[in-house]
Image (cartoon, rainbow, N blue to C red):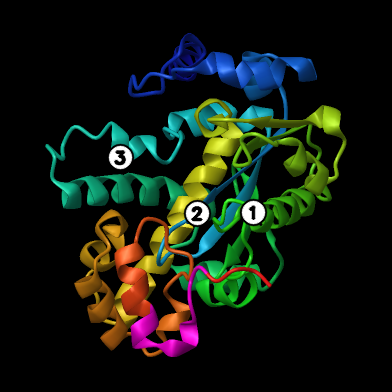
């Protein structure tokens, strides 16, 4: 009991369980306070649906959107498990000493430990099997809904959509899948608030409109995964499913998980060619929209004409 009380006090004072600071709460509260709640009230006195995604703008991982429902009586147990924004496990790792593989593996180990406890899954096949019974899955401390957009589906349906600036607009896709996950949960649980990690930035009202639930109960906030426990749960589950997906892909095609999938920031033509030779249908695995990798796009198009120009103008 004292330990849980200490965890609550620590979180309220501005740190996670292991002392990692929670900075920038003011911006989050700007979105929360107009809804008639406070930081403590939202996290410890309300039942909350939180949603987040992973895989945005990535090359190999599918886009995964998760909405997680957390009852107020489960919050302190989740804090005890060191639930926090999934990105923070890597950012504050002290064991890596600059080694990128160690950073990747350390973050993955922690997220997988917590993700397994939250979901009960030990493989991506576990997730697929349970999802056959419906999008909503109820576990001990969290009830969640997960939507996965495989890259093949992404390529078939979204490759020609562009903004006025000429960039691919993933927000339309994410609004649709966030709304589907949130509404699936809202139909089954007794929630007080919905908190969405703001991916729309300048136009959060678009997210509210797409969700379609009472606006006085929807909070769209930047960095919500840092300050809302329900959103942190969604963040960890989404990331965990992404790791399980990559584990299976690497095992099926005898690839190195880190070298081939964990270093998307260093995606190169040689890496592209190596994967192209091993994957039986590359179009199912490469994301058509590849941010920052213009040097690879030309090679992708040369290797398979069927992919077309990845930055084609919308008709």
Q: Which residue is mark 1?
A: 174
Name the residue carrying label 2.
Answer: 56
Q: Nearer the viewer, residue 185 or 220?
A: 220
Is residue 145 something one can see in this rendering?
Answer: no
Q: Residues within 10 Å of mark 2 (few under 14, many from 20)?
A: some
3D distance between C-alphas at marks 3 and 2: 18 Å
Q: Is residue 267 visible?
A: yes
Between 122 and 239, which is closer to the camera in this rendering?
239
Percent from the top left, x then y, of residue 234?
Answer: 56, 45
Quarter of the image for residue 191 reads top right
Q: Is residue 23 above or below residue 239?
A: above
Q: Residue at x 59, y 68 (%)?
A: 313
Q: How many marks?
A: 3
The reply to whether callout 3 and callout 2 are in contact (CB within 8 Å) is no
Q: Are marks 2 and 1 in contact (CB under 8 Å)?
A: yes
In this view, the residue farthest toward the right is 214
- In the picture provided, is 57 more to the left or to the right than 46? left
The boundaries of the magenta stretch are 301-311
At 39% from the left and 23% from the top, the residue drawn is 17
Residue at horizontal 81 percent and vertical 38 percent from the top: 190
List x then y, in percent, for residue 197. Answer: 60, 37
Q: Quadrant of the C terminus?
A: bottom right
Q: Quadrant of residue 60?
A: bottom left
Q: Residues within 10 Å of mark 1 (few under 14, many from 20)?
A: many
**In the image, what residue occupies the spot 53% across and 34% down?**
225
Q: Secondary structure at mark 2?
A: loop
Of label 2 and label 1, which has the lower sequence position? 2
> Could you tell me how far apart the alpha carbons at marks 1 and 3 are, in whole angstroms?
24 Å
Residue annotated with mark 3? 90
């Amino acid at each position: 009991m004292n330990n849980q009380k200490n965890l609550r006090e620590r979180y309220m004072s501005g740190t996670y369980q292991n002392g990692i600071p929670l900075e920038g709460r003011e911006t989050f509260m700007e979105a929360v306070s107009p809804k008639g709640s406070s930081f403590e009230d939202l996290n410890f006195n309300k039942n909350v649906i939180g949603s987040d995604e992973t895989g945005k703008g990535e090359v190999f991982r599918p886009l995964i959107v998760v909405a997680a429902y957390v009852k107020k009586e489960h919050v302190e147990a989740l804090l005890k498990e060191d639930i926090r924004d999934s990105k923070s496990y890597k950012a504050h790792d002290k064991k890596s000493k600059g080694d990128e593989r160690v950073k990747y593996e350390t973050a993955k180990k922690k997220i997988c430990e917590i993700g397994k406890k939250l979901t009960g899954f030990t493989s991506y096949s576990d997730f697929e099997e349970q999802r056959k019974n419906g999008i909503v899955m109820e576990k001990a401390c969290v009830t969640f809904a997960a939507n996965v957009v495989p890259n093949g589906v992404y390529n078939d349906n979204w490759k020609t959509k562009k903004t006025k600036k000429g960039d691919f607009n993933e927000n339309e896709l994410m609004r649709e899948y966030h709304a589907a996950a949130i509404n699936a949960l809202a139909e089954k649980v007794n929630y007080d608030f919905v908190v969405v990690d703001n991916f729309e930035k300048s136009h959060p009202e678009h997210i509210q409109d797409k969700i379609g639930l009472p606006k006085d109960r929807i909070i769209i906030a930047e960095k919500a995964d840092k300050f809302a426990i329900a959103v942190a749960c969604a963040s960890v589950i989404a990331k965990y499913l992404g790791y399980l997906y990559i584990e299976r892909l690497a095992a099926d095609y005898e690839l190195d998980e880190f070298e081939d999938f964990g270093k998307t920031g260093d995606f190169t033509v040689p890496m592209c060619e190596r994967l192209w030779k091993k994957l039986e249908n590359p179009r199912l695995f490469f994301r058509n929209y590849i941010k920052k990798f213009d040097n690879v796009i030309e090679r992708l198009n040369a290797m398979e004409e069927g992919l077309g120009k990845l930055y084609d103008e919308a008709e």
